[in-house]
Amino acid sequence: MKYHQINSALFVKNRRKFMAEMKPNSVAVFNSNDIYPVSADSTLPFAQHRDIFYLSGVDQEESVLLLFPDAPCEHQREILFLRETNDHIAVWEGEKLTKERAFQVSGIRTVYWLQDFHKVLNEMMTYADTMYINTNEHYRASVETETREARFVKWWKERYPAHNVAKSNPILQRLRSVKESEEIDLIQHACDITEKGFRRLLGFVKPNVTEYEVEAELAHEFIRNRSKGFAYTPIIASGNNANVLHYIENNQQCKEGDLLLLDVAAEYANYSSDMTRTIPVSGRFSERQKAVYNAVLRVKNEATKMLTPGTLWKQYHIEVGKIMTSELLGLGLLDKADVQNENPEWPAYKKYFMHGTSHHMGLDTHDYGLLHEPMKANMVFTVEPGIYIPAEKFGIRLEDNVVVQEKGEPFNLMRNIPVEADEIETLMNE
């Protein structure tokens, strides 16, 4: 892995929190992701399932974690199963975890090779009453591919029909949404790498550069700082492309007078950052562009202040909508009649700001978190308002990552990334 090894104490702590929420006499199993085929012998780069990583730190394929806090013997309470490595694998694929190295990474002392999994599981199931299965219940999830986890659940239900079934996901939704200090440090590191990429761009972007050249500059800077690269598919949208919310072609030329919307960020050690900035291709905002830009910035700043413990998700977005409505009235994009006659289910401001303002972030860019429960300290959120004006051929979005604090305003992990219009112009013209 490119990243520095994470102290195993984080994963020990995460497992203890999870096991404290398990029912008596229950087992939980977590599988790594598959390596997904493309065609012939080609595959996509491996990306670890975030749940097994969160609980173990293991970052390789064909790995399984078993947790059984009430197991009869202490050595059976946390077990890792790994693909057995050998000299042939080392030559063709590189280093894989040995049992000793797995302990260093995870803090788990009992490590078996994967061929022993069914035998060990069968013994554990004779002691247990309940099995925790790990289904994907994220509110944005739309999964068509059968995952390794799904195949295991199907097999397990057929093999052990007399056991009770419980779900891991509700526990993980709560645990993963509240970050440990070590996790916040890792997200901060990802944000710091993102800052380096953005500052590199401020001296690079000019008329006639292409969106894909901008993407290449970012990839260079991210990887040279120990990131695998982008935390998500980058959006590099010049001119009217910014009005396509998930524009990812990144194949157009940036023209003089255009704005360039950059929704781009680095990952680090599987933790995401998530930044959006909008900059003038020519190095100067027009008067109109700056007016809209500053309106978006004010909404971002005011919305950030609301991310405090006890805040309810639905009410937060209602309040942000009121602030955005005021700004759109000031810009002449809405008038009082638009607001008075608006549909409460789709308020007038949604014509120009049609997406949400914030989402949880962490190991996943759209991270775990139960939206019906109040916000808590040490949750990490994006704040990303935008105004999109196809008729004027530009859109502006600004996005930071912030940590909810027990007291006071949220802590901005992107506080060092330029966002004020005047600072961006100054840096682009140095």
Image (tube, rainbow, N blue to C red):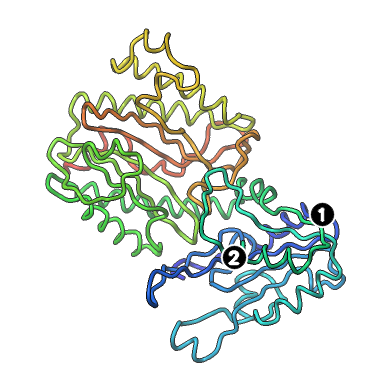
Residue type, label 1: Lys
Q: Secondary structure at mark 2?
A: loop
Tell me how far mark 2 sits from mark 1, CA to CA.
Answer: 28 Å
Q: Nearer the viewer, residue 366 or 56?
A: 366
Q: Which residue is mark 2?
A: 7
Q: Name the quadrant containing residue 244.
A: top left
The residue carrying mark 1 is 23
Where's residue 101, x and y in %? 60, 78
Front of the two marks 2 and 1? 1
In the rendered structure, which amino acid carries the disc numbered 2? Answer: Asn
Give the total of numbered labels.
2
Location of residue 223 with respect to 205 vertically, above or below:
below
Q: Around disc 2, counting alpha carbons within 10 Å, would you say few (fewer than 14), some (14 to 19), or many (20 or more)?
A: some
Return the x and y of residue 197 as percentages of the image width and height: 31, 53
On screen, 34 above or below 100? Answer: above
Task: Compare marks 2 and 1 and give the one earlier in the sequence.
Answer: 2
Nearer to me, 194 or 167:
167
